Image (tube, rainbow, N blue to C red):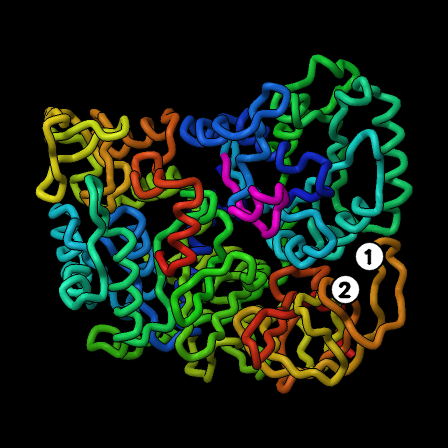
Amino acid sequence: MTTRTRLSHLQQLEAESIYILREVAAQFERPALLFSGGKDSITLVHLALKAFRPGKFPFPLVHIDTGHNFPEALQFRDDLANRIGEKLIVRYVQDSIDQGKAVEEKGKFPSRNAIQTVTLLDTIAEFKFDACIGGARRDEEKARAKERVFSVRDEFGSWDPKLQRPELWNIYNGKIHVGENVRVFPISNWTELDVWEYIRSENIPLPSLYFSHKRQIVWRENVVFPVSEFVTLDSSDKVEEKTVRFRTVGDMTCTAAVESEANSLDDIIREIQTSRTTERGSRLDDKRSEAAMEERKRGGYF
Amino acid sequence: MDLLRFITAGSVDDGKSTLIGRLLYDSKSVFQDQLEAIEKRDQVNGQINLALLTDGLKAEREQGITIDVAYKYFSTPKRKFIIADAPGHIQYTRNMVTGASNSDLAIILIDSRKGVIEQTYRHSYIASLLRIPHVIICVNKMDLVEFSQERFEEIKKDYINFASDLDFKGLEFIPISALNGDNVVDASPNMPWWKGKTLLGYLEDLELEEDENKHDARFPVQYVIRPQTEEHHDFRGYAGQVRSGVFKKGDDIVVLPNGHRSKIKSILTHEGEVEEAFAPMSVTILLEDEIDISRGDMIVTEKHVPNVSQDIDADLCWMDARALVPGNKYLFRQTTGSVKAAVREITFRIDIQTHHRLDASQLALNEIGRIKIRTAKPIAFDNYSENRGTGSFVLVDEGTNNTVGAGMITGSN
């Protein structure tokens, strides 16, 4: 009998991610899955279905809504939670601002990216979450490349890259003191292309934002920027209509689009394979300084 | 397409970061915006400093050294690669052990001008200890020795002599220049005498299947799925990842350490039932009988049964600033299990430079030695040399919760 006894790279990545999700379920009392309605967290939810069905998820889905999200992503988020019958908790950055805990940035490019951390940490405290599962990948950014799969954060949510626990074989150590929490990244070893190929092979539905559509845009720092109620336009901005899609979906204030005709998963994969820029090349929040991501992560950002 | 995980080792100036940068760059895995970011910084002899592609932390860029393991990814049409980029400094032995623990292959760099040095031995020893099956010795900076075949052969001979007590399944030597790209991705016109593969060619063609342990079926139970709903009233599934070997529907199984026996009723994935599961598949196993099984238990087939004992001998890499002394108690974490354990004895400490066994009353940070340890309850395990998945463990300090030791089981006593 000849049997195939090696998994493809996507199957290996999938098996590893399912293993990590089950480790979270077994090692923590109050975990949560951070879910934004973007492709990476949608992939996480799909992996969680594989890890826990026919049982229920041992954690709720949690979204920190900045108030600047794309309506398409929010609609998708609600529909998905309904469809799979799992609990969704939403907390709002606007509430943190109204309570005086967070202060809106000033200037022409105000982003709620940084103050999102305030609401996240409050939400962790409110529900006493001891683990937060997220869809970050090591290939996204050079500071992320240093991230553990189980990343311990202190009571302030801070990450200290010099004091990380060694992580050996596939033995994950989730032991923490009260007040600390662990950020868990089950798709650490996936690349952007892996995620897209997996979405194609598993036929996972995505928000329409990822596929080409016509949209009003302005050019900002050489990137195609979507016009929305949250973007301040002045006389130097020229609004145009372009056929675009989003390669990564964050806030409307920091996520740029790419000009693209790709409207199927095959097209998108072909486009990424030949792309000469990284996914995060269209994120203005990362372009602020060379260590922008590292600084945010040290401060408790995802 | 499949997956190869490898580690790169070499001392500080051997060109490790440059080699990784070169692999990424020549395999077209570097994006324009990443290049623009490093082009803004210093350039070496008018060339892009490829080493800047790998150091992710501010302190690393400031100091020009790698502090912690970083993971890098690239793929070719044949294979996806995960690189564990580990620091070369002696004080970061624990980081090299960390990177080595999941690797199928190690690339060890030697500077062609310096030849085999102490660091080479240390890295080779760790690769051997961690049972990385394949090692490639990249003799780097060949451009600085006029691409001399004699020099390459001399280093190769030295290495073989010096590594005679180490155990690798496959050992290859490749003359390269990471800075210029000779024999990294493209064959070098400067070394027509080299008839072997390029580094990438070797990485792409390496057979991995034969490295797997196929005869010992091991399934550590990770999580019990019990929906207790109307539809799945009696469902009791043991979820986990097959660590080695193959499980088939109908197999007679034993649950360790308690020794209960049963038969596999079905093997489930999200897509439905499958006839068999092999490593590293994550599946859910249903058994014919209702027996008491929980996380940390190991399901095995009757044919090849692992050891069960409370007294274990192991090689240990110590990773904590506070030294290990006999009598200390830790949490012993192996596969999905967790049990208290006391270190009874440090049998010897290893001088990593010479491989000599030394008497030791303690193990300090980054030291490696043989220990005897007693667990509070019996555990099921294989020797690390036969099974990296069931023969490895970590020690967790219950005061700090830190992972303080990495162990490789050598037997029971």
Q: Quadrant of residue A268?
A: top left
Q: Quadrant of residue A86?
A: bottom left
Labels 1 and 2 within one chain: yes
Q: Which residues are magenta?
A: B58-74
Q: Position of residue B44 (x, y in %)?
A: 62, 25
- Labels 1 and 2: the sequence-earlier one: 1
Identify which residue is drawn at 67% across, 78% down.
B308
Q: Position of residue B337 (x, y in %)?
A: 54, 75
Tag 2: amino acid: Ile
Identify which residue is drawn at 69% across, 80% down.
B309
Can you see residue A162?
yes
Near-viewer residue (B307 or B341)? B341
Please identify the quadrant where the C terminus of chain B is shown.
bottom right
State yes or no: residue B70 in magenta. Answer: yes
Near-viewer residue (B226 or B47)? B47
Q: Alpha-carbon neighbours of circle 1 within 10 Å: few (<14), some, or many (≥20)?
A: some
User: In the rendered image of this protein, does residue B284 appear above or below residue B36?
Assistant: below
State yes or no: residue B246 in magenta. Answer: no
User: In the rendered image of this protein, does residue B31 appear above or below residue A86?
Assistant: above
SS at circle 2:
strand
Tag 1: amino acid: Ile
Q: Are marks 1 and 2 in contact (CB under 8 Å)?
A: yes
Identify which residue is drawn at 53% across, 67% down.
B219
User: In the rendered image of this protein, does residue B92 appear above or below residue B179?
Assistant: below
User: In the rendered image of this protein, does residue B339 appear above or below residue B390?
Assistant: below
Checking the image for residue B223, the label placed there is: none
Checking the image for residue B352, the label placed there is: 1
Identify which residue is drawn at 84% across, 42% down.
B117
Chain of the residue under the numbered disc 2 shown in the image: B
Q: Position of residue B341 (x, y in %)?
A: 65, 82
Q: Which residue is mark 2?
A: B368
